[in-house]
Every structure is written in C-alpha cells, then in structure tokens.
Amino acid sequence: MPKRIKASLGAALALACAAGAGSAEPIAGYLAPDEFGVVDIVEPAPRPGDPRYETDREIFRATRALIGTPRWALATSDARLDTASLLRDFSCAAGVALTPEEAPRLARLLDRASIDTARETDEAKAVFQRHRPYTIDEGQICQAREELYDAKAHRVSYDYPSGHTTRGWTYALVLASLAPDRAQRILERGRAYGDSRFVCGAHNESAVEAGMVSATATMTAVAGKPAYQAELADARTELAVLRVSGKPPQGCAAETDLLKERVMPHLSTNGDRQAAMGAPGMQGSNR
C-alpha cells in the first residue's frame, strides 16, 4: 500500500482514539509505518473454490438464526468501536469499571497500540480485498450498513482481516499482560468480541481469525519498543490502584453466563441448524 494511504489510515484512527480518550490531539503508534508487515504472516483470504470460502458462507447463514437472541444483542453492543465502549466491554473481565477518565494512561496505551495493529490490518484488507458476507448472501446484520461503507472508495469496506476483531484483541492482549490474574477472563472476552463480528454478520469467520493473528503478530513487534514498555509500566500502576479504589462493573453475571456458551460448537454443518446463545433448542455449555 502506498505510504500516503497508510499514513492517512493511521491518522484517521489516531483522531478517533484521541476523541474516545477525551483528548483533542491525535496520537501516534509505537511502530514506524514500514517497520513491520503483517500481510505475509496472515493466511491469504479465502477465494471462491477454497473450502474456507464455503465454510464462511455456511457460518454466515447459520448465525442468522441468532437474530433476536441475547448473543445477537451482545454482538450489537460490541459493534461500537470507540475507546470508552471498548473499556466498558472489558470491565467485567478486568474486575473493575474502566473509563478513559478513570484510567487515562491505560486508554492512551491501548489506543497507541491500536494505531499500529489497525494500520497492519488495513494494509491487509487493501491487499486481499475480501468482500463482506452480506454482500455475497442475503441476511440481516446487527449494525447499520452505511457504517461499513467506504465513502471515498464508493464501496463497502473490505472484510479480511476484521478491524473490530483486531482492535478488540489488541485490548485483550494488553489488558491480560497488565492483569495476569484476570488473563483468562480478559482473553475469553476478547475472543467473544471477535465472535460478535460474525454473529453480527458484518464479517466472515475467517476474517475474525485473521484479525486475531494480525493483532497478535503486530503486538509482538510493539512489545519490544521502549516507549511501549514505559507506558505499559505506568498503565500497570494506574490499573492496580483502580482495581483497589474503583467502582465495580455492572451486569457481569449476565455477561459471564452468556460467554460460557461459545457460538461455533452449536452451529450444525448438516443444514439442520439450531440457534445458540439463548435461542430455542440450545444444548448445554460447551467450552
């Protein structure tokens, strides 16, 4: 991707992150734009004729059975991508109510890291040019379709890897390193945040997996940066204080029960599908 395009994508996310964190100034990531490349690390996107392509279609059609269930409601909530919403989404997993106001160092750390991971995922999107599932098969999605439209390119934005998953998994990786005693819950929530994208129908399941790989690979490069390590230490101290003095998160019992049920094990591959996550006919928990 040309440097000017990559820079513009990074700047756009920097502005969004700064707004979500309550700052008027854009922020930059920890990596130089051409320092790392994830395109050769993630698997190429599925194409017609690839078994993964048909599997994605099957998953999209099967998950339309989740419309109107509690899992659909969670996917709808997870579609919000701003900093405050992401911090709220991970509050139960972290064990304390997280907000940009109560944890500004944490918010800045997460948003700076997200600049790097988003840039790599956006470059991969431009290379693979995979179409979103609802443009291939008819089906309702959990967010307004205009939110997924790239006005500058005059088309729906590309699918693979998932940008929401990349950002959510970035948050999960960083938070798990800051609170290792909560790592299990935090990573489970990060996984569920990615699952929400194919439950929503905004992304194919393969794009969710690619988003996790993209974020993990990029964060491996970010982790070696002295600036990241310094801000990580500051955020760890801030979070430790907040976990003692902060407010407890709300609605955690319902979220915990919902996340015990994974989406994929409940999707039949023989055409006789049953809805999962609160839909009729769901079987017991399968983690």
Image (cartoon, rainbow, N blue to C red):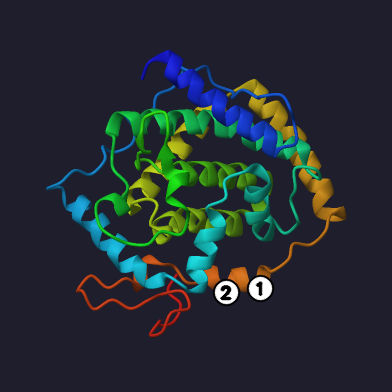
What residue sits 32% from the left and 47% below the top?
Answer: 132
- Residue 39 at least partly seen: no
Name which residue type carries label 2: Asp
**Label 1 crowd (10 A; few <14 / some 14-19 / many >=20):** few
Q: On the rendered structure, is 122 left or right of 17?
A: left
Label 2 element class: helix
**Which of 140 and 161 lies nearest the eye of the viewer?**
140
Q: Is 225 placed above or below 213 here? A: above
Q: Give the mark count.
A: 2
Report how far apart the C-alphas of labels 2 and 1 lie in the structure.
Answer: 6 Å
- x and y, in percent, of residue 184 in the image: 58, 58
Q: Which mark is residue 271?
A: none
Give the camera-side residue of 259 and 75.
Answer: 75
Q: Quadrant of residue 42?
A: top left
Name the quarter where the N terminus is drawn.
top left
Query: Which image quadrant is residue 45 in?
Result: top left
Q: Residue furthest bottom?
A: 281
Where in the figure is residue 178, as x and y percent of width and height? 68, 44
Q: Which residue is mark 2?
A: 257
Contact? badges 2 and 1 (CB < 8 Å)? yes
* Residue at screen point 65% across, 58% down: 93
Under mark 1, the amino acid is Ala
In percent of width and height, residue 131 lies at: 29, 43
Q: Which residue is at the far right?
A: 245
The residue that appears at 37% across and 62% down in the rendered structure is 140
Tell me the SS state at disc 1: helix
Which quadrant of the rendered structure holds the C terminus? bottom left
Q: Is residue 116 visible?
A: yes
The percent coordinates of residue 78 (x first, y second) are 55, 55
Residue for badge 1: 253
